[in-house]
């Protein structure tokens, strides 16, 4: 099976712009999670989606949003970019069911490196 | 808040030395624990995981971890490290979607 894919791999934006990142999960996986990785804050949870519904949300401002489509692909959007949004954004997918929420393995993609100038 | 702690931020070892990286979790909630590794320039890869049952779990590349409920710990071990083990290691609490701060391991040849 192909792994989790993320596009684009690299992005350069300027402050105030918005950006959309895309994630395609492993075939058959219905759960997608997003994380932000920075040297200072480490890996921080952004959102979790299951069957097009946001199941969990991390402690990020409303400028960060996401969605999941019927084919399980997911996008996250960051509006009004700030310098501090520069980070590696990671997507992970898992095959869990609603009954076993939070009990399956997450497989990570390579990430999108966002640089905000 | 339920959290995961990794107290060793940077560990430097010589090849063939034994490794133990600490991971502690806070009390409460479901305890499903993972160790991931991130090699330079690569994505996070699963080393091993614990859900229930035998508290000693074995993973890939000779790594193992022991879940000790009384100590709220899930430490990662390897009896003999190699230069290729140089990477950053993360403990992860699955149900709470929380990572530890990571431990950078440098293995000197």
Image: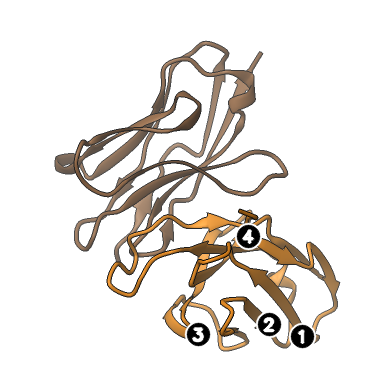
Disc number for residue A78: 2
Q: Chain of mark 3?
A: A
In-image side of B100 versus B53 (left or right): right
Return the x and y of residue A92 as percentages of the image width and height.
55, 62
- Can you identify the residue that label 3 sits on? A52
Front position among marks 1 and 3? 3
Q: Are the residues under badges 4 and 3 in a single subunit? A: yes
Front position among marks 2 and 3? 3
Chain B colour? brown
Return the x and y of residue B86 as percentages of the image width and height.
61, 29
Residue B45 to residue A11: above or below: above
- Decide: few, some or many residues near mark 3? Use Cα within 10 Å; few <14, some 14-19, many ≥20: some
Contact flag, marks 2 and 3 (Cβ < 8 Å): no
Residue B44 versus residue B7: which sits nearer the camera? B44
In-image side of A49 versus B25 (left or right): right
Contact flag, marks 1 and 2 (Cβ < 8 Å): yes
Q: CA distance from mark 2 to mark 3?
A: 19 Å
Q: Earlier in the sequence, mark 1 or mark 2?
A: 1
Residue B82 to residue B24: above or below: above
Residue B102 versus residue B81: which sits nearer the camera? B81
Q: Chain of mark 2?
A: A
Q: Earlier in the sequence, mark 1 or mark 4?
A: 4
- Can you identify the residue that label 4 sits on? A4
Chain A colour? orange
Return the x and y of residue A35 as percentages of the image width and height.
56, 66
């Amino acid at each position: 099976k192909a792994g989790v894919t993320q596009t684009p791999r690299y992005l350069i934006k300027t402050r105030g712009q918005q950006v959309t990142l895309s994630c395609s999960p492993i075939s058959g996986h219905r759960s997608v999670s997003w994380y932000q990785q920075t040297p200072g804050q480490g890996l921080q949870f952004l959102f979790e989606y299951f069957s097009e519904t946001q199941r969990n949300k991390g402690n990020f401002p409303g400028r960060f949003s996401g969605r999941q489509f019927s084919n399980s692909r997911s996008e996250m959007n960051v509006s009004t970019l700030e310098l501090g949004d520069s980070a590696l954004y990671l997507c992970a997918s898992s095959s869990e069911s609603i009954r076993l929420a939070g009990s399956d393995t997450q497989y990570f993609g390579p990430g999108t490196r966002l640089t905000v100038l | 808040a339920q959290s995961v702690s990794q107290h060793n931020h940077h560990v430097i070892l010589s090849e063939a030395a034994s490794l133990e990286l600490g991971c502690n979790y806070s009390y409460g909630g479901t305890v499903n624990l993972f160790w991931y590794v991130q090699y330079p320039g690569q994505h996070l890869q699963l080393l091993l995981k614990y859900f229930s049952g035998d508290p000693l779990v074995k993973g890939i590349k000779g790594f193992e971890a022991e879940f000790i409920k009384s100590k709220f710990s899930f430490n990662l071990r390897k009896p003999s490290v190699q230069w290729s083990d140089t990477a950053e290691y993360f403990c992860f609490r699955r149900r709470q979607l929380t990572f530890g701060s990571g431990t950078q391991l440098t293995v000197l040849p």
